[in-house]
Amino acid sequence: MDGLDAQLWLPFAGLAAGIVLGYAARVSRFCTLSALERYWYAGDGTGLRTWVLAAAAALVATQAMAFAGLVEPSRSFYLSPAFGLSGAIGGGLLFGFGMALVGTCGFGAVIRLGGGSLRSLVVLTALGLAALATQRGILGKARILLVDDMALDLSFAGDQSLGSLASALIGLDLRLPVAAAAAAAMLFWVFKDRAYRGKGRQILAGTGIGFVIAFGWLATTFAAGHAFGPVQIEAGSFVVPVGDTILQMITFTGDLPDYGVGLVVGTLAGAALGAWRHQEVRWEACDDARELGRHLLGGTLMGVGGVAAMGCTIGQGVSAVSVLALSAPIVMISIVVGAKMGLGWLLEGSPLAPFRSHPKLPAE
């Protein structure tokens, strides 16, 4: 395969992976916010366990391929030795709050758009433009000042993976034991619930989604080894790639779409296929200007926050987990807290309401 073939192969590899990803997520109702809401308010951990299973499957597959020398996740920006702690926390809070305002994340918006949700089209447009502005536009100045310039230097460990950090601190190569322990802990939590062990469809969906994300490392590593120009080593995210997809649609610069653009388009196609096959296609729009404004604001917050945090619920929650990046748990905790604050603002009128202790009623 020559350099041009490798560049052409990338978007088609992303397209194929996205079709599988979108279809699986659509038919299994895979949604991070929905999983959190059902866990918090209904005591149902099915969705959350499926999401954790996806991250664990991606972790196992990625680490196995890395051990075999098939992928090079160390070249990913997730493992940069410069760790933007302020972006991980602040960006995660913004993303989570925005996610609550629109009822889903960027990935979920793509899935819903496949079923005919015009609200999701509004969200993705705002998210994509805000992401581009934060990464390459005027908001990028603030990001550099508040995130990049304040980043922690972890070069003593080589990168920011938990395995490398543990190895540097202990003086032994603990990368494989740390990865094995993390995967074992996640899988134990997922399958300790007897009822979940009987949900074959959810288990298949979570495992499949994790493997599709891990495939991204293989596809981009392979292309990087054969392409003439630089290729970004990535697995899957739905923040900047959404903006790149918009740019590819409205401009022509001579640059070919990358893996991320192919993944976004493929996910939309796969979700549309799943919605059509299950007769779930229906047009949905905002009911009024207030709802439209909420979706625009939520999409914008997710775009800005996702770039500051260097990922979303898929980018940090699955892709970064698969390489055990230090940013992954910090960003995901921040996203969860931000989502809780957003839901508190929507349901109780205050973002701090979910964290206030409610007085117990006197016993009768």
Image (cartoon, rainbow, N blue to C red):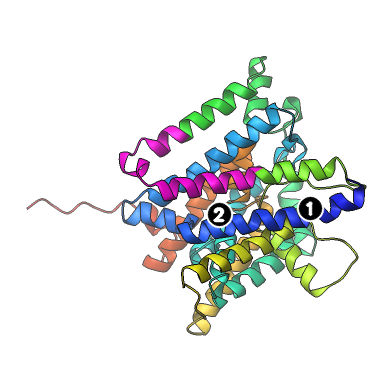
Give yes or no for residue 357 being in the magenta stretch: no
Q: Residue at 61% x, 38% y: name it.
A: 322
Q: State whether residue 325 appears in this view.
A: no
- At mark 2, the secondary structure is helix
Amino acid at the residue labelled 1: Leu
Q: Nearer the viewer, mark 1 or mark 2?
A: 1
Stretch in magenta = 187-214
Where residue 154 sits: x, y (%)? 72, 31
Farthest residue to the bottom: give it: 288
Disc 1 to disc 2, C-alpha distance: 32 Å
Q: Position of residue 269 (x, y in %)?
A: 63, 66
What is the quadrant of residue 353 in the picture? bottom left
Query: Which is more toward the observer, 128 or 108?
Result: 108
Q: Earlier in the sequence, mark 1 or mark 2?
A: 1
Residue 361 in which image quadrant: bottom left
In the image: residue 245, left or right of residue 47: right
Q: Position of residue 5 (x, y in %)?
A: 87, 52
Q: Circle 1 sits in a helix, a strand or a loop, which is it? A: helix
**Is 200 within the magenta?**
yes
Q: In terms of depth relative to the viewer, which is nearer, 217 or 76?
A: 217
Residue occupying image coordinates x 44% and y 59%: 34
Q: Residues within 10 Å of mark 1 (few under 14, many from 20)?
A: many
User: In the displayed image of the protein, which residue is found farthest to the top?
Assistant: 171
Residue 60 picture location, percent across and down: 58, 34
Q: Residue at x 77, y 57 (%)?
A: 11
Question: Mark 2: which amino acid?
Answer: Leu
Residue 223, relative to residue 34: is it above or below?
Answer: above
Q: Which residue is mark 1?
A: 10
Mark 2 crowd level (few <14, some 14–19, many ≥20, 10 Å Cα): many
What label does residue 93 carry, if any? 2
